[in-house]
Amino acid sequence: MAKEKETKSNLPEAGIELKEEDIITAMQQIPGYVDITPRDFKEIYLLAFQHALERLRREVTVGEIMTRELVAVHTDTPLAEVAEAMGRRGISGVPVLDETNKVVGVVSEKDFLSRMGVREPQNFMTLVSSCLRTKGCVALPIKKQTAGDLMSTPAVTVSPVTQVRDLAKLFTDRRINRAPVTDAEGHLLGIVTRGDLVRATLQVDRS
Amino acid sequence: MIGTFFRKMTGITQSPPKVSGAEVFWSWLGSFLGIAAVAYLNVGFLEKTDLVLIIGSFGASAVLIYGAIKSPLAQPRNLIGGHIISACIGVSAYKLLVVYPWLAAALAVSVSIAVMHLTKTLHPPGGATALIAVIGGPKIHNLGYVYVLIPVAAGAFIMLAVALLINNLAPTRRYPEYWI
């Protein structure tokens, strides 16, 4: 009895209780002499299990770092309103929803620039230079259009349980700066940006 | 207090399972050929010289490198490193403390274990290799530091070559687990 008690108090608890018979059976499945006692194996297993749990706990998900303040437009929102909303909020991209409030695309500054005849590189100074070389406003060709006409679609969306590490890879691979966060049905829950990702890195280091 | 102390002597787990018949066969074959190689070369080439190629600690190495090949103690780093380091320490202990053989013997083994630990080359037969350098009699003593090369390093490398060949012939075996 004393033996039993000591075994339990010395070892951390794991999700599944591993019995010595299991270890013996496993050792029999490995051909050759395995140079470890069942108890030592159990101890290593339990400690390794704890480390794995801690590691998983440390891994931050998109849901923890996303911005929940929802700014979104609809496919039929006129571009003037879209631009106004983006300018007022100081954001460079906004999710576009269809009539059932599902995310169907994203409108970003780059989409505006490309439709306004700005060739590579699609940045503000290229726009200024083309403005200065032409008569009238370069925004005229898209004056009557809506968010649905301009958006990049389908939207690259992520789920709140996406790992931050996978998010970084997605941003890099797809060359995007933000992704709408949606639930399983495609409804908007928030948005996650490169800025959120940078802040998340700081938090992980601190903890 | 006293109760806890003695209860620690009761053991806490069961012994690991017995190995299969095939394992027994490969352990037997490997150790037979490994020791045969060293002993045959010893008789064939060194009999008329002052050199020897076979020492008792190789019997212990055979247990590990043919019988418990997954063990860290049985890996090439440990086999070669453990024997060579212990041989150096054993010869040094004998030379420095030739007037106190009991102290030379104890230090040869204990320092070898410590240095094998520190160099991650722990190999139990190394302790015997160090001890043999002290208690091995005039033939061993006359070798001086040559003992490190022949029989120790040479014999260990021959045994390792046989282990690599025979252990990897066995379908269920793979050797080594690591080199360095």
Image (cartoon, grey):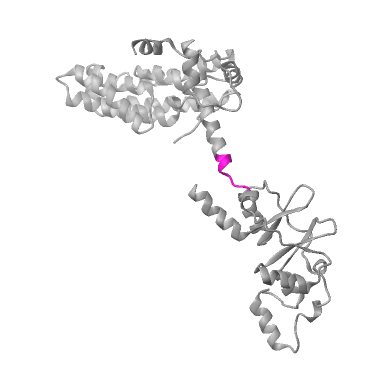
Q: Position of residue B14 (x, y in %)?
A: 51, 12
Q: Nearer the viewer, residue B132 or A180?
A: A180
Give the number of callouts: 0
Q: Nearer the viewer, residue A19 or A121?
A: A19
Q: Would residue B50 be seen by someone viewing this image from the given angle?
A: no
**Image point 53% across, 32% down: which residue?**
A50
Q: Residue furthest bottom?
A: A135
Please say if A194 is above or below A86: above
Q: Would residue B123 be seen by someone viewing this image from the given angle?
A: yes
**Image point 71% across, 59% down: which residue?**
A70
Please say if B60 is above or below A105: above
- The magenta stretch spans residue A184: no
**Image point 35% across, 22% down: which residue?**
B53
- The magenta stretch spans residue A60: yes
Quadrant in the picture for residue B39: top left
Name the side, left or right, on which A173 lies relative to B61: right
Please say if A206 is above or below B179: below
Query: Magenta residues?
Result: A55-61
